Image (cartoon, rainbow, N blue to C red):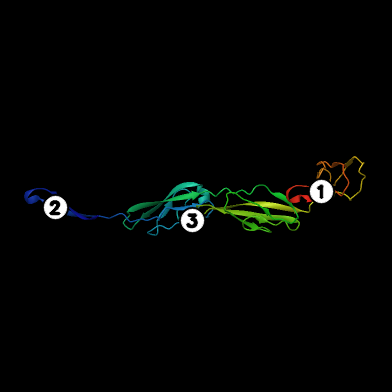
């Protein structure tokens, strides 16, 4: 850049004439669109500011005033441009690369049903390292099924890019179906085989000498305890 003089000559000898023209060569404006940056796809509108003020932005999901929408751009690398023209009509452009990061995939599994019985039930979400929030649950996933009702619990995870996602588990806490082994009774040593029947049906018997279906053969005198179990997991009851 600078001022440059040029001379134009015409004729010769006594008829030679000259004229001088000055040309000013202007430098391009220094334009700065800012540093490259990362953003999560759900981060909302990002307003970019170029320097000097008064330029025009362009690019994918970018308005001319500098509003970038990562949800419209989508996951990936996006180059946007800031174009500025100064008072001398000299134009220059700078660009910014915006990395739009996807949200982490978070999963807590299916909704589930538990019974209103004492005892903590541990839940885990994936990826590991997230935090639980909700009713009757600790931040590390210890759920206390106390009280009948439907409980909404949310697992939230933040990845290495600072992007956050969550998944929800509904836990339906119901009253357990209590196992009933019936009343105590007496038999004679020569009775032979005895069939015990518990309620509700399809439970399991346990104890010394009894089959899971409740058949017991009397072979000795004494007092014998047998347990009838119904249900499974947190809903298991015994009598």
Image quadrant assignment for residue 130? bottom right
Q: Which residue is mark 3?
A: 46
Front label number (3 vs 2): 3
Decide if residue 63 is in sight here. Answer: no
- In primary-sequence order, the first of circles 3 and 2 is 2
Q: Going from the N terminus, do you reach mark 1 or mark 3 first?
A: 3
Question: Mark 2 Cα within 10 Å, few/some/many (few <14, many 20+)?
Answer: few
Q: Please state the horizontal and vertical placement of residue 177, each as a whole percent of the image.
A: 81, 50
Q: From where the camera sits, is residue 168 visible?
A: yes
How far is mark 1 from mark 2, CA to CA?
A: 123 Å
Which circle marks residue 227 in the picture? 1
Q: Which residue matches tag 2?
A: 18
Residue 215 position (above or below residue 27): above
Q: Are marks 1 and 2 in contact (CB under 8 Å)?
A: no
Ranked by sequence position, the earlier of labels 1 and 2 is 2
Image quarter where the N terminus lies is: bottom left
From the image, state whether disc 1 or disc 3 is nearer to you. Answer: 1
């Amino acid at each position: 850049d600078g001022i440059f003089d040029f001379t134009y000559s015409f004729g010769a000898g006594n008829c030679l004439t000259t004229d001088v023209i000055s040309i000013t060569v202007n430098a391009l404006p220094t334009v700065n669109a800012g540093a490259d940056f990362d953003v999560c796809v759900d981060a909302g509108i990002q307003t970019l500011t170029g320097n000097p003020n008064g330029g025009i932005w362009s690019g994918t999901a970018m308005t001319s005033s500098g509003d970038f929408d990562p949800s419209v751009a989508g996951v990936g690398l996006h180059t946007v441009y800031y174009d500025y023209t100064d008072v001398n009509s000299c134009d220059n452009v700078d660009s910014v690369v915006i990395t739009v990061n996807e949200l982490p995939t978070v999963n807590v599994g299916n909704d589930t049903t538990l019974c209103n019985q004492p005892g903590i039930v541990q839940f885990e979400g994936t990826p590991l390292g997230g935090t639980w929030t909700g009713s009757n649950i600790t931040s590390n996933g210890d759920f206390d099924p106390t009280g009948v009702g439907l409980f909404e619990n949310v697992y939230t995870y933040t990845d290495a890019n600072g992007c956050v996602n969550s998944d929800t588990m509904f836990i339906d806490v119901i009253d357990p179906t209590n196992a009933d082994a019936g009343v105590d009774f007496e038999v004679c040593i020569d009775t032979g085989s005895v069939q015990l029947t518990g309620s509700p049906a399809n439970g399991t018997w346990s104890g010394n000498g009894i089959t899971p279906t409740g058949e017991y053969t009397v072979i000795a005198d004494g007092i014998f305890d047998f347990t009838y179990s119904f249900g499974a997991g947190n809903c298991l009851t015994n009598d």
